[in-house]
Amino acid sequence: MPRLILPALLLFIGCDTDVGITNLPDVQAEAPVAVLSVTPTSLHFDSPQIGSSQDVVVANIGGDDLLIENIEVFLAEDRFIVSDAPLRVVEPGQSTTITVSWVGTDSADASGLIVVHTDAPEAGSIEVSVTVAAPDVVGCDPLGTPFGGGDGTSAEPWRLCSVDQFDAIRTAPEAAFRLYSDIDLSAASLAPIPVFSGVLDGANYTLSDWSHTDPAGQLALIRRLEGGHVHDLNILRPVLNAGQGEAVLALAVIDGAVVERIRVTDASVTGTDGFISGVVGTVGAGATLSDVVFDGNIVSHGEIGFVAGVVNTCRGLCEKLVSFGDIDAGVSWKVGGIAQHVSGGRLSGCASHMNITAGSRLGGVASIQSGGIIEDCYSDGVLTGVHWVGGIVGETYGGSGPIVRRSFSASPMTASTTHSGIGTSGVVSWDPEPVTVVDSFWDTDVTGTLHSAGGTRMTTSELQDPSNPAFIAWTGPWVLVDGQYPSLAFE
């Protein structure tokens, strides 16, 4: 809808009084008088929602009582209102607050005035100007079929505000979509969308309480994201129970697809045959996973592991990833707090706060690294395994020249046994493929280990000292504060 600009109303409001100022006796003219002060004298609402409000403070900075007689609003079609304003006496040095609320529901910009009238001729009437850059209010019809509006283009995405409309994404997998409200999936029998190559803009709304069980199958909201874009989406309290292959959002992000700004919270993910991850399965070469948080519990039954907090296999760009919660993989192997496998990709900027129980090849950040780069990452969750337990990486093999740089571990670690003499390790546990570890450390006081295939030992005090010369290369996302472990600015 085109915006309509309403000109400001130019008003002059006189003072209601039966006595002219020039007729006041000299003694009254010289007496302390009420003085009205209004703060602020102008208000601006920038794309407000209905009910958005701001306050105006009316104060008496004079020496006599001040009576507020009336408050008037001058704005076409009454797009804002003021709080109930009965007669108010404001004593010297005191103030009262008037709340101004936006009630407009259309897309027109607006301007106007609030006029505060008093009984004191000397104080007069004071005007407060109001300007509004009103929101573009585009409706979504929850009863619309198959969608609540739009035409599926990037300019006018299909509008989603009901379960049936979200489920209908599968009927137009190459189109553009946008959520217009939170959607409760608790009563829905929502099956995975097989393939999606369009755009899904979550607009920071939330899909809540999706629950699905398929003991013999694979589970995710979208099985394959092929060249599409999913962004700004919250997923609350998902409960998944599957066989082999499971992730909350997508099993495969490939063909240049982008997933960014996703929050999965209070999740429960359970699998029987491995290849389980909190948010995404595989990020293919050329694809991107960025700014993603997982918070929940992951349980892997059976002997097959391959479990990760956020992404199972990273072959593309995986950045700004954070995980919270617990992983219980029993004694199964290959389990990582952020990724299960970094395979030639770049894992850049990540923090694992997950407590992990697993078997062999357990990594606080990644279980396996075959080539590729892990940088600006750390772990501080409790790691409990059988052997080859690494603060950052469990094992390196295959690929070519894996690199770990500007990373650290402060994870308490235990191993029930050793293999090839290795139980727990500070940065990288076992390295059949030689790994280059640069500017990376582990806290020997907390981890309880002196072994690592690369990296530098530090005490807690050394790792929490930002003046330590070892941190000279730690710029970019790192925040260094005295007496605290390094943290990442995007957390």
Image (cartoon, rainbow, N blue to C red):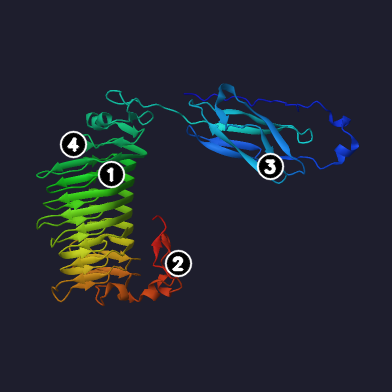
Which of the two labelled residues, at mark 3 and mark 4, occupies the earlier sequence position? Answer: 3
**Label 4 to label 1: alpha-carbon separation:** 25 Å
Residue bearing mark 3? 59
In the image, is 386 to the left or to the right of 85? left
Q: Quadrant of residue 228?
A: top left
Q: Nearer the viewer, mark 2 or mark 3?
A: 3
Q: Residue at x 22, y 49 (%)?
A: 268
**Label 2 to label 1: alpha-carbon separation:** 38 Å
Which of the two labelled residues, at mark 2 and mark 1, occupies the earlier sequence position? Answer: 1
Q: Nearer the viewer, mark 3 or mark 1?
A: 3
State the SS at label 3.
strand
Please say whether residue 341 is visible from this viewpoint.
no
Residue 134 drawn at (x, y percent): 52, 30
Please say whether residue 97 is visible from this viewpoint.
yes
State the SS at label 4.
loop
Label 3–label 1 contact, CB within 8 A: no
**Label 3 to label 1: alpha-carbon separation:** 60 Å
State the SS at label 2.
loop
Residue bearing mark 2? 481
**Label 4 to label 2: alpha-carbon separation:** 47 Å
Which of the two labelled residues, at mark 2 and mark 3, occupies the earlier sequence position? Answer: 3
Which of the two labelled residues, at mark 4 and mark 1, occupies the earlier sequence position? Answer: 4
Q: Nearer the viewer, mark 3 or mark 4?
A: 3
Q: Which three-letter amino acid code belongs to the residue tagged 3?
A: Ala
Q: Which three-letter amino acid code belongs to the residue tagged 1?
A: Gly
Q: Nearer the viewer, residue 354 or 314?
A: 354
Label 2–label 1 contact, CB within 8 A: no
Residue bearing mark 1? 256
